[in-house]
Image: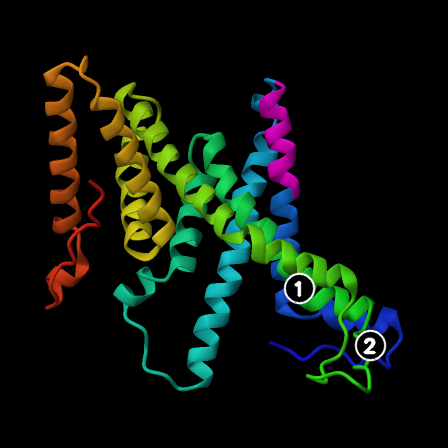
Amino acid sequence: MAPPPPASLPLPQRLAALAQTLQFAWFVGHFVLIAATVKYSLSWIAMKGYRSNISYRFIFLSAAVTYGIVVYKTLRARAKQRAPQISPLALAADENVQYLVLALIWLFSPRYILATLPYGIYSFFHVATYMRANLIPVVFPPKPAAADSVDGKPVAHPIADMIGRFVKEYYDASMSVVASLEILLWGSVFLSALLFQRRSWILLPLYTAFLRARYSQSIHVQNSFAKLEANVENLLGNQGTPPAARQAWQAIKNGGRQFYLATDINRYIGGAAAPPKKTS
């Protein structure tokens, strides 16, 4: 990350220096993504989503640009450090690569409103973090620490502190919402496949692979699946539940665990497959 421009420079020069960084392009991409998500969501609520195809495509074009920048910076940093060449398997395990590929898939696929929301939530926190750490200190340089300060750190602008508190308080809860949305989106794609909607049978295995990778990497996704399983268990625990429903649910759980084991990469590269998280 480039150091912030000196506070002694005039504000226009500080902003110009900031705008010349690749990270600023990343910030702009996330900001555009948020704007496009808001516009498309409002159009969808007003039952005019069919008129907002450009906004929808801009969401995933912006996502592809922003995640592409992160992947590019990661690979460039490895090249500068003369690190060993990253394997395709390790590259595919990078969540930024996963969201980049998924953004490209959604960009050229039929529209799903749920597909836009996780990217929008991620971008909201990325924009907030960038503003706190980069933009606000350039516009309002931190004041020198008071003489009696214990840590001697410069005093940040109150807006930066407020954003920091907001991110710290709501980030984990928001990531849980993202995980739930991603699971719900799988259900939407699965339903589309059952109805033989356009390209749904192509999307289903691709998105299933993405969600499987997220389950391995994200505690929030694991917890969301655990909550879903617990809710279904409670629902089927009623005395009036037909035995066939319980048998079907047990078959689904067994199938899910078999799928988890069969798709565990460690199983094929010499490691033992980790058992799926116990939820009942």
* Residue drawn at 18 percent across, 59 percent down: 265
Secondary structure under tag 1 reads helix
Q: Main secondary structure of the magenta part?
A: helix
Q: Which residues are magenta?
A: 35-46
Name the residue beneath numbered marker 2: 143
* Residue drawn at 62 percent across, 60 percent down: 129
- The front one of 77 and 140 is 140
Q: What amino acid is at disc 1?
A: Phe
Q: Is residue 250 magenta?
A: no
- The front one of 175 and 207 is 175
Q: What amino acid is at disc 2?
A: Lys
Q: Circle 1: is it few (<14), some (14-19), or many (20+) Cα within 10 Å?
A: some
- Location of the N terminus by quadrant is bottom right
Q: How far is disc 2 from disc 1 in space, using C-alphas?
A: 24 Å
Q: Is residue 37 magenta?
A: yes
x then y, percent, for residue 93:
31, 61
Query: Mark number for residue 24?
Result: 1
- Residue 54 figure quarter: top right
Residue 199, can we see it? no
* Residue drawn at 82 percent across, 67 percent down: 139
- The front one of 64 and 242 is 242
Secondary structure under tag 2 reads loop
Query: Mark number for residue 97?
Result: none
x then y, percent, for residue 218:
35, 54
x then y, percent, for residue 88:
28, 65
